[in-house]
Image (tube, rainbow, N blue to C red):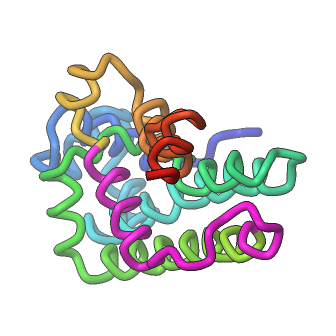
Amino acid sequence: MKTTMKEKIIRSMLGLLQTQGLKFTMDDIVRDLRISKSTLYNNFKSRDALFEAMIDYLFETLDAEEREVLESDASLDEKLIAIISVFPREFGVFQNHVYQSLMNMPAVYDKIHAHNQQRFAHFNEYLDKGVKDGLVRENIPRDVFFHLLLLAQRGMTDPNVLASFNMTYRDAVNESLEIMLHGIMTDEGQHQTESK
């Protein structure tokens, strides 16, 4: 499928976020793509509009990945992990300071917040299914659980943390969720703890 000019501009912006953080300018995009300013501004009227389009683009990618797993024959725990861990490669540009700056842009914040709510609604549906099927404890405090998930997800966006773990973002989040869903104790360890 042919890449549109809008997508080229968004991909250029993602590359510039990686190398320059939020210091990049619209002129940097013009130079990177060798396009005219009028071409850029015909597609995006402002830098803020470009940020909003970038968030939409990334979430569309993420939603497609999530749908693929949810529509598969994967097990419940694989689907739960997938809902949280699907993460477009491009999100790697969101180091904590970039993420915090984006969250200060009201329209971007609203999009990120709405998308997180949607993902946790999906997660809740699968938790409910797990409870119904006897695979998930009914009495877990979900607000606490979701907060832990968000902390794990955000904590793993720091490239220095990932480098120290020698892991990709996806691997680190998968390991975090594996621990949350299955604990750190073996069956024997759980048996001994429960028998005391």
* x, y percent for residue 99: 23, 57
Q: Is residue 147 magenta?
A: yes
The residue located at (18%, 50%) in the rendering is 96
Q: Is residue 192 visible?
A: yes
* x, y percent for residue 116: 47, 71
The residue located at (41%, 79%) in the rendering is 143
Observer-nearest of 121 and 75 = 75
Observer-nearest of 61 and 48 = 61
Which secondary structure dominates the residues rendered in magenta?
helix
* x, y percent for residue 6: 51, 54
Observer-nearest of 22 and 119 = 119
* x, y percent for residue 15: 33, 35
The residue located at (17%, 62%) in the rendering is 100
Q: Is residue 39 magenta?
A: no
The correct choice, above or below, for 10 with respect to 113 in the image is above
Residue 192 appears left or right of 60: left
Observer-nearest of 187 and 71 = 187
Q: Residue furthest top?
A: 166
**Which residues fall within the magenta stretch?**
130-155
Quadrant of residue 163 within the rendered picture: top left
